[in-house]
Image (spheres, rainbow, N blue to C red):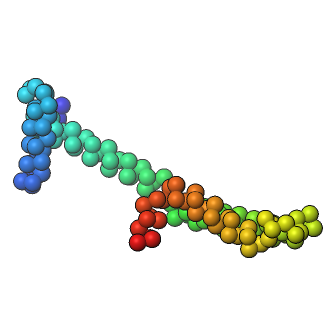
Amino acid sequence: MAKVQAYVSDEMSEKINAIVEKRRAEGAKEKDVSFSSIASMLLELGLRVYEAQMERKESGFNQMAFNRALLESVVKTQFTVNKILGIECLSPHVSGNPRWEWSGLIENIRDDVQEVLLQFFQEVEDSDSE
């Protein structure tokens, strides 16, 4: 095992000591938990996070491009469905049926969408109404 000497701030030292004390209070043996073992664990965790970030930067995934492609697909789908629904409303098979009047359909769709959104975003809706 390599020996590494690193200097940390007093605040970091206090936080590491607090972890050591907490582990000991939870029943860890003194030889199993030390400042050195906790510092080593934290260093290893930090290194893993750093490597994961570097892999993410090197990957071909672009969140902005993904968001744009997703939004584009949703908008295309919305416009396509609107046009198809508009055509269907003009069909002689449904003429005179109040359930197929355009204004009623739009209101019905909005209500259904709002109901689904409330299942996922209850907190946001509550704060918007205040």
Choose top left, top right, bottom left or bottom right for residue 103.
Answer: bottom right
Which residue in the rendered view is the most extreme toward the bottom? 103
The percent position of residue 44, horizontal first and vertical second, equals: 25, 41
* Image quadrant in which you'd find residue 57: bottom left
Query: Residue at left 27%, top 42%?
Result: 45
Please provide percent x and percent y for residue 38: 16, 38
Q: Quadrant of the C terminus?
A: bottom left
Please tell me whether residue 117 is drawn above or below residue 37 in the rendered image: below
Residue 79 seen anywhere in this rendered image of the structure: no
Q: Residue at x 84, y 69 (%)?
A: 89
Q: Quadrant of the N terminus?
A: top left
Q: Left or right: where does residue 45 sit relative to residue 87?
A: left
Front residue (pair 66, 82): 82
Residue depicted at 38% across the width and 48% down the height: 52
Q: Name the foreground residue: 25 vs 33.
A: 25
Point out the residue furthest to the right here: 92
Q: Is residue 40 visible?
A: yes
Does 93 appear above or below 36?
below
For the residue pair 25 and 34, the one nearer the viewer reads as 25
Task: Tell me residue 63's x, y (percent).
Answer: 50, 60
Q: Is residue 52 left or right of residue 32?
A: right
* Relative to 27, residue 71 above or below: below
